[in-house]
Amino acid sequence: MKALLLSEYSHLEVAELPQPVAGAGEVLVQVAACGICGSDVHGYDGSSGRRIPPLVMGHEAAGVIAAVGQGVTHFAVGDRVTFDSTVYCGACSYCLSGQINLCDNRQVVGVSCAEFRRAGAFAEFVTVPERIVYKLPADFSFAEAAMLEAVAVAIHGVAVSDLKGGETALVIGAGMIGLLTLQAARAAGCSLVLVADVDATRLKLAAEAGADTTILASGAAMVAEVLRLTGGRGVDLVLEAVGRDETVSAAVDAVRKGGTVTLIGNITPQVTLPLQKVVSRQIRLQGSCASSGEYPEAIELVAAGKIRVSPLITAIAPLSDGASWFARLHAREPNLMKIVIDPRMETEVASR
Ligand SMILES: [Zn+2]
Ligand SMILES: [Zn+2]
């Protein structure tokens, strides 16, 4: 099969690799769409240490079941499916309590690090365990399905924030996750959703995605605007989708006393904590990692049009364009949101 192989750091090539075989409890998926994730771009140059070559990356995928391994009962050849990026063991204490994102033996599709190595979906075929697979509704496009992983992450960030309905919220960062988090907060019943970013183009997408007000500012100027819009009180919830010193600090300043700051972004490994503000204003800092069973809800919300993902898809491209799209994303070319690779396009070209 053809695959986009990270043969060495910062070098991708379309390679001919053996087609994987579905083992016991696994399904073989013919990939029809696989999104390029920010974590792939950070892994590609070696900076994250989570994409040790040689590796086929790609964990935001959808396709059609091409074969089933021994003991697979829920899926059959021809089913249209997507799958979770997290491969959980199903047996540890976290899995048994439903917190599959915290699995002690957690692996991620399309990631290789010191602990594990697992081939991903920038390829014509990929194998994944049956338990992470979800069926897609008949009219659900594969490209939209490739966005479900990010949608599930956004829904999870809102879910761990424990909303009761009617809250005011601020999303910091109008990147992919921020734009989806804004829609998830809206769907969860927030009465007011503000979105802040320093990029006007992204804020335009935020406004189109349903932000009540967008704030083109950062730091103290952003906080001042949030306070102005909330009568000096601050918002009930900040969903922080960046993860830098400045944005985390601004999140603490923009939330009301007793409010919650949910930390989703982690672009830097460490930030300075404004400890006295957090303690004296009794702010809850809540981390959010990946997703934990939110796929069915993600499928429902996208199918119902409550979360719209199509405006976030910049391009759908064949495997042979993968290397150049990675280079453009790595160079931080402006106005690129999600690039979806469709390995079937490659097949068509090759068969002509
Ligand atoms: Zn991802
Ligand atoms: Zn587990």
Image: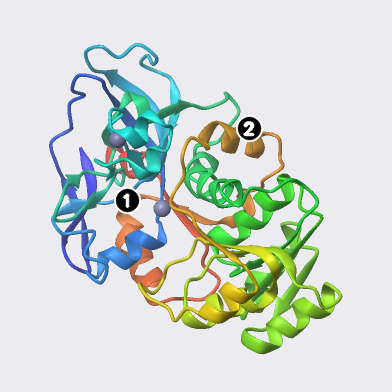
Decide which of 121, 269 is in the foreground and name it. 269
Q: Amino acid at mark 2?
A: Glu
Report if residue 155 is visible in the image: yes
Decide which of 254, 44 is in the foreground and name it. 254
Residue at position x 80%, y 63% from top?
A: 212
Alpha carbon separation for disc pair 1 and 2: 29 Å
Residue identifier under label 1: 319
Query: Where residue 279 sits in the image (x, y, percent)?
Result: 57, 73
**Marks 1 and 2 in Cβ contact (< 8 Å):** no
Q: Is residue 100 above or below residue 282?
A: above
Q: Left or right? Give the position of 128 relative to 179.
A: left
Q: Amino acid at mark 1?
A: Leu
Query: Where residue 151 sits in the image (x, y, percent)?
Result: 55, 47
Report if residue 345 is visible in the image: no
Residue at position x 43%, y 20% from top?
A: 79
Q: Which label is found at residue 300? A: 2
10 Å crowding of disc 2: few (<14), some (14-19), many (20+): some
The C terminus: image quadrant: top left
- Residue sitting farthest toward the bottom: 220
Q: Is residue 128 above or below residue 253?
A: above
> In which quadrant of the rendered view does residue 33 lie?
top left
Q: Left or right? Give the position of 221 relative to 173.
A: right
